[in-house]
Amino acid sequence: MLQSIQSIFRIPELTRRIVWTLGLLMVYRLGGHIPTPGVNGAALESFFASQAGNTLFDLYDLFAGGNFSKATIFALGIMPYISASIVLQLFGAVIPYFERLQKEGEEGRKRINQYTRYGTVLLSVVQASGIAIFLEGLNRQYGMNIVAEPGFGFRLLTVLTMTSGTIFIMWLGEMITERGIGNGISLVIFIGIVARTPVEVINTIRSLQMGTINWLLLIVLIGLMLLVTAVVVMFTQAQRRIPVQYA
């Protein structure tokens, strides 16, 4: 393994791709600290902390790398792009036009990718509008000063900011796929989840100290995590060897 790691720096092309990938992922993480204008990030984070474990937003926030609970410019994450991709795949099964595109090879794939981008923008606008209305609702429902100046101007600014953020993340993912290593979209999701690992480890240690969870439960959870990881790796590397005869 050590020899494989050393060989990475002996191949200029591979080194360049790794540096490119790490650089783009760092840009993604830095953008996750830029707040959406007009939102009190500290008050919003305090609200989500008080609601932890009681809402469905926690799962969404996990894939968004914690950006949703802070209402950053990357609050929507890459989920609109993934949703648009799934919708286009379903269209290929029920709409003849998209079915033909899927069979046209490289040219059809480019057209589908273009439609996916359009769908991403549309979904981002809808979701960002919902988030803006949701944030304004927190002001009225809980009396929290999360949105300084509610109204049409705030909603428009939120839609423009978060939609632009999602488009930028989509571009980062495509650049990683094209010039870096691996699938860019998957790496964006991965780095968002991994970034929360230190916080989760600290929270687990505190729970052990407070007696909320015991060592037996922790050992079982770690065992399940290792088992799931092993199964995923096994299926990923699985092969079915089929003998092929040539004339």
Image (tube, grey):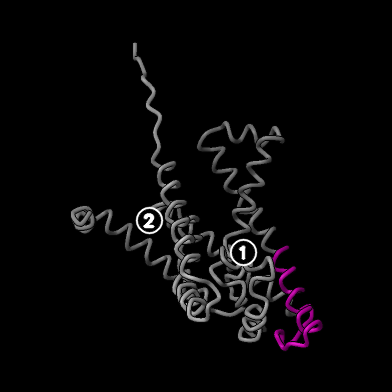
Amino acid tagged 2: Gly
Closer-to-camera residue (216/182): 216
Q: What mark, if any, has residue 180 been given in the picture? A: 2
**Location of residue 193 with respect to 202 vertically, above or below:** above
- Per the picture, the main secondary structure of the magenta-coloured stretch is helix
Closer-to-camera residue (10/48): 48
Q: Is residue 148 magenta?
A: yes
Residue 44 placed where, x, y %? 65, 82
Q: Which range is magenta?
A: 126-152
- Residue found 67% across the figure and 46% down from its top: 87
Residue 30 visible in the shown view: no
Residue 214 placed where, x, y %? 50, 71
Name the quadrant containing residue 219: bottom left
Q: For numbered disc 1, what is the local secondary structure?
A: helix
**Location of residue 132 with respect to 7 vertically, above or below:** below
User: Mark 1 or mark 2, which is nearer the start of the sequence?
Assistant: 1
Q: Is residue 108 magenta?
A: no
Label 2 Cα neighbours within 10 Å, binned few <14 / some 14-19 / many ≥20: many
The residue at which mark 1 appears reads as 59
- Residue found 62% across the figure and 75% down from its top: 69
Closer-to-camera residue (103/201): 201
Distance of label 2 from label 1 (alpha carbons): 28 Å
Q: What mark, if any, has residue 125 been given in the picture? A: none
**Is residue 246 found left or right of 82 in the rendered image?**
left
Of the 4 image quadrants, the one containing the C terminus is top left
Label 2 with label 1: CB-CB less than 8 Å: no
Label 1 Cα neighbours within 10 Å, binned few <14 / some 14-19 / many ≥20: few
Residue 34 placed where, x, y %? 54, 79
- Residue found 44% across the figure and 46% down from its top: 231
Name the quadrant containing residue 50: bottom right
Residue 127 placed where, x, y %? 70, 64
Residue at the far top in the pictured view: 247
